[in-house]
Amino acid sequence: MPFVSNLGEIMKEKGLTYEELQFKSKVAPDTVARAKDERIASCKLLTLEKLANALDVDVCDLFQWVKEK
């Protein structure tokens, strides 16, 4: 998959657990876990916005594009 998740790194920097991020963002814990370890295949923009707002980052900071070879 050409997208790499930065969610785990951001959570670590902010000192947030899955439970804390789920509570702050109102996003299901399973969705947070799948987004963190890149098991997520699709996601609503609203969900990404909720996660970004809870982490006080831009939506574009959550993932990075890695060009496939």
Image (cartoon, grey):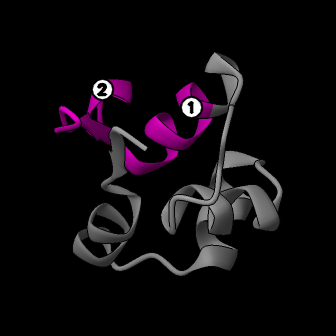
Q: Earlier in the sequence, mark 2 or mark 1?
A: 1
* Disc 1 element: helix
Q: Which residue sits at x=51%, y=69%? A: 37
23 and 44: which is toward the camera: 44
3 and 7: which is toward the camera: 3
Instruction: State the image coordinates of residue 18 (x, y, percent, origin top left).
Output: 62, 76
Total numbered labels placed on residues in the image: 2
46 and 55: which is toward the camera: 46
Quadrant including the N terminus: top left
Disc 1: CA contacts within 10 A as few (<14), some (14-19) or many (>=20): many
> What residue would you read off at disc 1?
48
> What residue would you read off at disc 2?
60
User: Taking 21 as reference, is 49 above or below it?
Assistant: above
User: Taking 19 as reference, is 38 above or below it?
Assistant: above
Q: Which residue sits at x=18%, y=32%? A: 67
Q: Which residues are magenta?
A: 48-69
Q: Which residue sits at x=23%, y=36%? A: 68
The answer to whether residue 5 is left or right of residue 36 is left
* Disc 2 element: helix
Residue that protrudes farthest toward the front in the picture: 69
Q: Amino acid at mark 2?
A: Cys
Q: Amino acid at mark 1?
A: Leu
Instruction: State the image coordinates of residue 23 (x, y, percent, origin top left).
Output: 73, 62
